[in-house]
Every structure is written in structure tokens, then in C-alpha cells.
Amino acid sequence: MINRPHIIILGGGLIGLSCADSLITGGARVTLVEKQAQTGHGAGRYNSGMVHPSQAAPWLFKGDKLSATKLVLKLAQRSSDLLQNRRHQLGCLDKNRSAGSLQLFDSIFAGQTVFESSNDLGIAVDIYRGAWGFQRYGLHYLNDISGDAFHYCQRLTEDLIERGCHIQYGQNAALNTAQNQCHGIEIDGQIIHSDHVIVACGAQSAEFLNAYGINLPVSAMKGHALSFERPVGISLPEIPIMHWDSRSALTVFENEVRLSGTIGEDNPDALLDIWEEIAPDIVNAFADPVVRWSADRPASKLGRPIIGQTPLSNLWVNSGHGHMGWSLCAASGGLMSQMILDGKAAPEFALPL
Ligand SMILES: Cc1cc2nc3c(=O)[nH]c(=O)nc-3n(C[C@H](O)[C@H](O)[C@H](O)COP(=O)(O)OP(=O)(O)OC[C@H]3O[C@@H](n4cnc5c(N)ncnc54)[C@H](O)[C@@H]3O)c2cc1C
């Protein structure tokens, strides 16, 4: 590329970093601005670690759920393959980790309904046969995978820097706009010009864009995590275990066991009450949590992420991945790069203007 476009990305979470990755591969120069002192400390820091196309159905969405699910499923399946490849290249694939995830249900009827709809969508799913002794109806999703999202953010950040990405930390940027165009950002009284700016600020994207009169239908959906040292002497599941009713999960990582997720709970300790009932042998073997954490998922009111142009020319948004950001990050970054560098249209992900 003779004239390499300069692109500024606001937000160094899973989505901002993945945009940077694809844009640099496509030949762009990238400056990434992260308002915290490190990348990867947003909603992905202690997430459940599942790359789970099986969970593409939107939460808390009252529109055409089936169409939204099909759209997100397709993006997640593509993203899962891309991500696996990138994790392999970056040396952060955990070779001891088995593929798959298990979802447990309080009601057999709810489980059977999800089984039927998963089959209809072509998701590879089996009925749970009782491994690890959970006393519930369950579904085993064969093609989901898992891994530590924060470790990936760290490795990807190192790789991006090696490939020339400029990262500025701990700063709040404002947009530099004139005549309905975005010309770059203003930071510490200095203007940095760019050809394009991408807002990938997770759950804070809506508030950020609102200051420029742009309405982004994304709201914050709180989730929590408790992290424990791996207990010894008990059998731990090799794949993540989800609980449908509480929208939470138990995930065994290399050095920790994490309870995470929930919807509508104020406090991470709710996770202990939920999982004490589902997996008493594991929970009773835990010492005190080493981490208690809460974060806001960027939940789109459209039931799918919003990836596209804003009403200000040269200003783009990539947000609203809800409970699916780790599952969708690689393909979302790729799509953004194709839109900006190759002019690819993807109206199915557009911000309604
Ligand atoms: C408890 C929990 C469990 C989850 N489990 C899973 C899972 O198993 N699988 C899955 O696929 N997804 C999961 N998710 C969802 C996933 O983690 C999110 O969808 C994803 O992190 C969103 O990525 P993001 O980059 O949009 O936002 P974030 O990761 O929140 O990153 C946004 C970044 O932007 C920065 N920022 C904000 N404002 C500005 C600004 N003005 N300027 C510069 N930077 C700014 C923030 O500091 C942050 O670093 C889970 C989330 C939670 C909370």
C-alpha cells in the first residue's frame, strides 16, 4: 500500500485490539488509545473464557430473535476459526484444553427446547450423559472452545507493538470534528490527525458517542467473577460448565477456577450461592476467592453487535458484543478492517441512522 491510511482506535479491549490486528495486517498504520494503564482490563479481563457460537442467541432482546441468532452464529463460527489460528500463531493455545462446553438447566423442558432450537440452527449438540456427576439435564456443545481472553489480549498487544502499532495509555481522548467529519482526536491539548477513527470503548461507547450527538443503542449489562486457586484432590471438568438459568459459568483455567457471569445480580458473591447448589464438591473445596470482579458487558439493543459507520464521516463504531465479545472478536476486527480498507458493505451490522 503506497499511502498507508492512519487509523486511530479508541479502546484496547478484545474488540479494539482485534481491529488493530486486522488493520495492520491490511496495511494500515494504527494508533490505539486505551484510557486505562493497560489493555485488556475491560469486560474481558475475568470473563468466562468461552468461545461459544452455541450461545449466539441474544439476551434481553424482544425483536426477531431467530434472525439475530443466525447472524451472530455465523459471525461467531467464522470468528472461532480465525481466533484459534491467531492464538496458535501467538503461542497462547492451551494444548491440554478439550473442545466443547456443557450447559446445565434447572428445568428439563427449558433444556429440551434449547436442544431442539440448537439442532434447527445446525449447532453440534449432544445430551449430557452425566460426566462429573452434575444432577441436572444438560447439553454438550461439541464445537465450542475456550481459553483465557486476558492472556490473549496481552500476547496480542505485544505482537501489535512489534508490528508498529502505537499505543497510548491512560488518556481520555476527544474527537476532532468539523463539518460533519472526524479528522482525528485531541488528547492532552494535542491534535492527532487520522484518516479514520474507530470507537471500540465497550459499554462506554454509547456515552462517548452521545457527546457528539450520536445515538448508539448499547447499554451496560453487569457481570461478575470470583476466581479461586485450583483445589487439589478433586476431579475438575476439562470444559466450561454453563448454567442456563443464572447465565453463569464455572471454568477451569491453567492456574485457577473461575465462577463468572450472571444477569441481574448486584454482587459477585451471588455466584457462590448458585454454584454451591450445582457443584457442591467443587465449591466446598475452594479457599477464599483471590479475585472478586465486576464489569459491564456492552449489550446491544439490536440483538447483534454494531459494526459500521456513524453519521460523522470517517468515524466508525465496533461495539455491542454483549456476552459474545470473546467469541466474536477476531471476525469483528476483520469485518471492520474490510469495511474501512476495502469498502466492503455489511448492512446487517450497521448502526441504524
Ligand atoms: C462476567 C463476564 C463473562 C463473560 N464471558 C464471556 C464468554 O465466556 N465468552 C464471550 O464470548 N464473551 C464473554 N463475555 C463478554 C466479553 O468479555 C465482552 O463482550 C468483551 O469484553 C467486549 O469487548 P470490548 O472490547 O467491546 O469491551 P471491553 O473489553 O470492555 O474493552 C473496552 C475498552 O475500552 C476502554 N475505553 C473505554 N472508554 C474509552 C475511551 N474514551 N478512550 C479510550 N479507551 C476507552 C476501556 O478501558 C476498555 O479497556 C463476558 C463478559 C463478562 C462481564
Image (cartoon, rainbow, N blue to C red):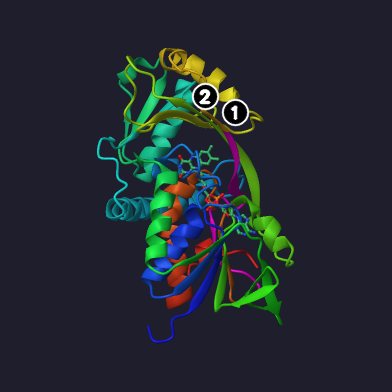
Identity of the residue drawn at 43% across and 86% down: 3
* Amino acid tagged 1: Pro
Q: Tell me the residue that label 2 is attached to.
A: 289
Magenta range is 293-311
> Is ligand 1 within 8 Å of the beta carbon of the residue shown at mark 2?
no
Check whether the beta carbons of the residues at disc 1 and disc 2 lie within 8 A of each other. Answer: yes
The relative height of residue 145 versus residue 20 in the rendered view (above or below) is above
Q: Tell me the residue that label 1 is attached to.
A: 268
* Amino acid tagged 2: Pro
Q: Secondary structure at mark 1?
A: loop
The answer to whether residue 73 shows anywhere in this view is: no
Mark 1 vs mark 2, foreground winner is 2
Q: Position of residue 264 (x, y in %)?
A: 64, 32
159 vs 348, nearest the viewer: 159
Cα–Cα gap, marks 1 and 2:
11 Å
- Furthest toward the left, the residue is 95
> Is ligand 1 within 8 Å of the beta carbon of the residue shown at mark 1?
no
Report the label total. Answer: 2
Q: Which quadrant is the N terminus positioned in?
A: bottom left
